Image (cartoon, grey):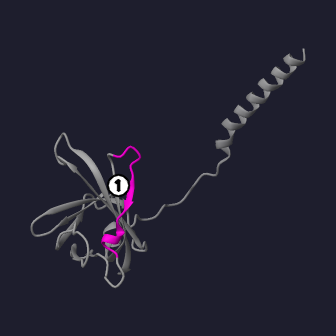
Amino acid sequence: MQLMKTLQFTQKSIIALLAFALLLPACKEKIEGEIGEPYDKVAGMNGTWELTNFIQKDLNNPVKEERDLSSFYIQDGITPLQLTFDSNDRSYDVALELGKNYFGTGGTWAFDDDLYPSNVILFDETDTLQFDLGRMVRTFDNTLSIELPRGCGLGTADATETVVYKFEFTRVNL
């Protein structure tokens, strides 16, 4: 008999909780107003960016191991890799004293889509380089994150990415 009463009480509790859960969203305040104009992503890239971190992610490793290789670019007394983007004429320059250059010699740049970019594309005299955006940059942000996937047969149907280079930059000036 006691077991029956306990089961009935439990059933009633569950029904009450479900009813409460269904009614809870109805109590939310309705959001009103405008979100505002979207940020200008092109203007967000404007300025000089200095490398602060360089990570290599091994995609063939089961745990997707990441190695910090920043010391190849960042050493005391030497200016780290710097990228300068001009949002007016869409030009870019590269200043590199140490490390491998993955960014060309300078030229022009573009997004794959100015409103909703996921890639930044660099055009220099001899090559076109495409980087994934790790995060979008607004004019007041001070961190730029871009990634360069590398692998075998990229651009073909049987492409295999083997490694991703992650570059973290800090804004030096506007």
x 26%, y 76%: residue: 98
Q: Quadrant of residue 145?
A: bottom left
x 53%, y 60%: residue: 33
Instruction: Give the position of the C terminus as an image quadrant.
Output: bottom left
Q: Residue furthest left?
A: 126
Q: Residue furthest top?
A: 1
x 42%, y 65%: residue: 37
The span picked out in magenta is 61-74
Side of 63 relative to 78 (left or right):
right
Side of 106 relative to 85 (left or right):
left
**Residue 160 % position (x, y):** 24, 44
Binning the other alpha carbons within 10 Å of mark 1 as few (below 14), some (14 to 19) or many (20 upward) gives some
**Residue 105 % position (x, y):** 16, 73
Side of 91 relative to 165 (left or right):
left
Name the kind of residue labelled 1 in the image: Lys
Q: Residue furthest bottom?
A: 77
Q: Which element carries disc 1, helix, strand or loop?
A: strand
Vertical placement of residue 20 versus 154, above or below: above
**48 drawn magenta:** no
Instruction: Choose between 30 and 85: the one closer to the eye.
Output: 85
**64 drawn magenta:** yes
Instruction: Choose between 9 and 62: the one closer to the eye.
Output: 62
Vertical placement of residue 153 versus 21, above or below: below
In this figure, which residue is indicated by the disc labeled 1? Answer: 57
Vertical placement of residue 5 versus 63, above or below: above
**Residue 35 % position (x, y):** 48, 61
**Residue 109 % position (x, y):** 21, 68
Instruction: Give the position of the N terminus as an image quadrant.
Output: top right
